Amino acid sequence: MNNKLGWLRKYRADIFRRSRCPTVVSTAVTFVNEQGVFRGAADQLVRLLSPLPMCEASQTVASRLLEFFINRFS
């Protein structure tokens, strides 16, 4: 396995950072599926996203999701 996948080691940090983005998106999608979209949804979504471990990329994703909610549903 090391012969076939060993090259991935040099991308370990990138893979780890990028794995946080789907968690942010999944949290937002689950929220919308369960709660819907409504005025004040951004505030509730902030509370759900805040405790998640974030990297720069996932912070950008979270910020853009929240911006969308604020612009559309405030």
Image (cartoon, helix red, strand yellow):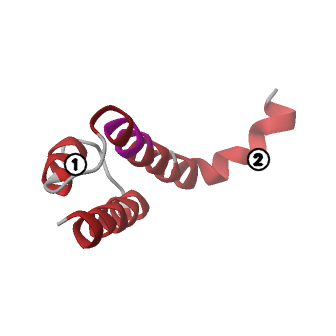
Specify the quadrant that holds the N terminus.
Answer: top right
Q: Mark 1 or 2 closer to N-term?
A: 2
> In terms of image quadrants, where is residue 3?
top right
Does the magenta segment cover residue 69?
A: no
Q: CA distance from mark 1 to mark 2?
A: 38 Å
Q: Which mark is residue 36?
A: none
Q: Determine which residue is flagged by label 2.
A: 7
Q: Secondary structure at mark 2?
A: helix
In magenta stretch: residue 30 = yes
- Residue 37 in percent (x, y) is at 29, 49
| The residue stretch that appears in magenta | 26-31
Q: Nearer the viewer, residue 68 or 47?
A: 68
Residue 44, position in %: x, y?
Answer: 15, 46
At x 30%, y 66%, the residue is 63
Q: Quadrant of residue 56?
A: bottom left
Magenta stretch, main secondary structure, is helix
Q: Is residue 7 left or right of residue 43?
A: right
How many numbered marks are there?
2
Q: Nearer the viewer, residue 70 or 6?
A: 70
Report the amino acid beneath label 2.
Trp
Q: Which residue is mark 1?
A: 45
Q: Is residue 20 left or right of residue 71?
A: right
